[in-house]
Image (cartoon, helix red, strand yellow):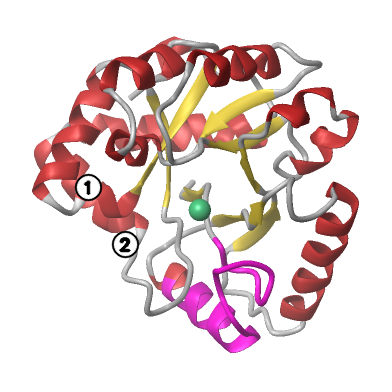
């Protein structure tokens, strides 16, 4: 099963799709790419909106889009890309932000150095209730933090997601290779925002993985994705 774990396809809720038309265009692209399931993960910023209001807005955006969906489109699962915020550790409603039907939370780091406070908070969250943490596009933080800090974060009981686009250029591909080699990566996403936003579809990553990495990784990505949707735990042995 081909699953996109990270996208901004819902209309008018964040800096992603601006309209139903753009959302449908993105879904057409994903359908042509053979995507079975796409996780709609609009940005959640705790300093801007309450969880209750966010869920309401997200569900409304989905309801608007739903009328325009066609059978060939990937199935949409609702979730959120939750920006790190210390206050979320004491927030009982956090589970409402998990990917629909699961205890998996897509967790975004701030674009700063990854400090020990952030690492400790993430560790605490990963041991809260049944929460399971998926760290969003882990390769991006290397623009802001040292590899050792990122490695410390990713050594926790968390799983990492890479963006498909990062496989398509030489320098970011090298970072992907190292992160995969160190056992931090489990799943992929496109992080697609708008049809013109220049992201890459999942097949672009799969092509590079098959040719330059190891084709068996594609089966692992599918296997891990299915486990997540079944809300089963992912073990460190399941890294790519
Ligand atoms: Fe995103």
Q: Between 113 and 134, which is closer to the camera in this rendering? A: 113
**Position of residue 131 measured from the top left corner of the image (x, y, whole percent):** 73, 23
**Tally of numbered discs:** 2
Left or right side of 70 for 88: right
Q: Is mark 2 within 8 Å of ligand 1?
A: no
**Position of residue 37 measured from the top left corner of the image (x, y, whole percent):** 57, 55
Image quarter of the C terminus? top left
Left or right side of 13 for 162: left
Few, some or many residues within 10 Å of mark 1 (<14, 14–19, 20+): many
SS at mark 1? helix
* Residue drawn 64% across the image and 80% down it: 70
**Position of residue 127 measured from the top left corner of the image (x, y, whole percent):** 70, 11
Which quadrant of the view contains residue 8? bottom right
SS at mark 2? loop
According to the picture, the residue beneath numbered tag 2 turns out to be 200
- The Cα–Cα distance between marks 2 and 1, rounded to whole angstroms, is 9 Å
**Picture layout, residue 108 above or below residue 7:** above
Q: Which of the numbered marks, if any, corresponds to residue 167?
A: 1
Which quadrant of the view contains residue 118? top right
Q: Which residues are magenta?
A: 8-29
Left or right side of 49 for 153: left
**Picture layout, residue 45 above or below residue 221:** below
**Picture layout, residue 34 above or below residue 226:** below
Question: Answer yes or no: do the residues labelled 2 and 1 have beta carbons within 8 Å?
Answer: yes
Few, some or many residues within 10 Å of mark 2 (<14, 14–19, 20+): some
* Residue drawn 52% across the image and 73% down it: 27
């Amino acid at each position: 099963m081909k699953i996109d774990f990270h996208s901004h396809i819902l209309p008018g809720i964040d800096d992603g799709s601006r309209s139903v038309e753009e959302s449908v265009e993105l879904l057409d692209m994903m359908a042509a790419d053979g995507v079975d399931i796409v996780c709609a993960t609009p940005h959640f910023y705790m300093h801007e909106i309450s969880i209750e209001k966010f869920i309401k807005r997200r569900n409304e955006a989905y309801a608007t889009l739903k009328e325009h969906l066609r059978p060939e489109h990937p199935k949409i699962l609702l979730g959120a890309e939750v920006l790190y915020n210390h206050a979320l550790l004491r927030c009982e409603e956090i589970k409402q932000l998990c990917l629909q039907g699961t205890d998996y939370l897509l967790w975004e780091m701030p674009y700063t150095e990854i400090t020990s406070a952030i690492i400790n908070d993430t560790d605490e969250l990963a041991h809260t209730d049944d929460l399971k943490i998926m760290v969003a596009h882990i390769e991006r933080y290397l623009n802001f933090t040292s590899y050792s800090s990122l490695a410390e974060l990713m050594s926790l009981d968390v799983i990492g997601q890479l963006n498909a686009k990062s496989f398509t250029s030489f320098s970011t591909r090298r970072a992907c290779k190292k992160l995969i080699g160190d056992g931090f990566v489990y799943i992929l996403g496109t992080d697609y925002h708008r049809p013109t936003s220049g992201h890459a579809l999942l097949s672009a990553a799969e092509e590079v993985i098959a040719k330059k990495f190891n084709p068996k990784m594609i089966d692992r990505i599918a296997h891990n994705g299915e486990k997540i949707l079944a809300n089963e735990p992912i073990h460190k042995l399941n890294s790519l």
